[in-house]
Image: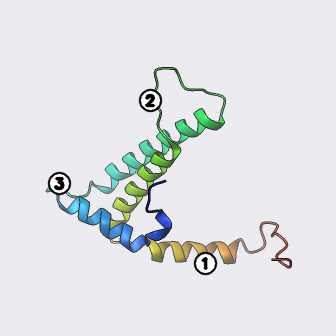
Amino acid sequence: MTNRTLSEKSLAQIQREVDAYISQFKEGYFSPLAMLARMSEEVGELAREVNHRFGEKPKKPDEADNSIEMELGDILFIVTCFANSLGIDLAEAHDKVMSKFNTRDANRWTKKNTDNL
């Protein structure tokens, strides 16, 4: 990891940083359909890296050595672009999703014993 870990940045800071980067270009954000295609491409690249590292498909000797960390970073970037272009606050979206999981899935999984913590 770099000197600055993701946990040191808020989602709002990440969204502002990405917006500042994209705003310097006349083209601006891609259309939602183009971003969805880009996101699919990036998820495919992540799947390839995971398959190479944990699956049964080793890399060819001449293949580039990409990392899972970089592929996840690419996905975070495009998700942030997508949210920014649609005016979505990712922290707010995260809170809504966590609320959904904490209510809908409250008893779905076996919880660890927290008495000893």
Instruction: Report the mark closest to the observer, 2 or 1.
Output: 2
Q: What SS does tag 3 mark?
A: loop
Residue visible at 37% across and 72% down in the picture: 13
Q: How far, Cα to Cα, is label 2 from label 1?
A: 40 Å
Question: Residue 19, image x and y in percent?
Answer: 27, 65
**Quadrant of res 99:** bottom right
Query: Tag 1 or tag 3, which sits nearer the N-term?
Result: 3
Q: In this view, does 23 lie to the left or right of 77?
A: left
Dot 3 and dot 1 residues touching (CB under 8 Å): no
Question: Residue 79, image x and y in percent?
Answer: 41, 58
Question: Residue 64: which disc?
Answer: 2
Would you say residue 89 is visible in this rendering?
A: no
Residue that numbered label 1 is attached to: 99
Query: Tag 3 or tag 2, which sits nearer the N-term?
Result: 3
Within 10 Å of disc 2 (Cα), the crowding (few <14, some 14-19, many 20+) is: few
Question: Residue 92, image x and y in percent?
Answer: 46, 77
Q: Is residue 77 left or right of residue 110?
A: left
Farthest residue in the left direction?
26
Q: How far, Cα to Cα, is label 2 from label 3?
A: 30 Å
Would you say residue 114 is visible in this rendering?
A: yes
Q: What SS does tag 1 mark?
A: helix
Residue visible at 37% across and 65% down in the picture: 83
Residue that numbered label 3 is attached to: 27
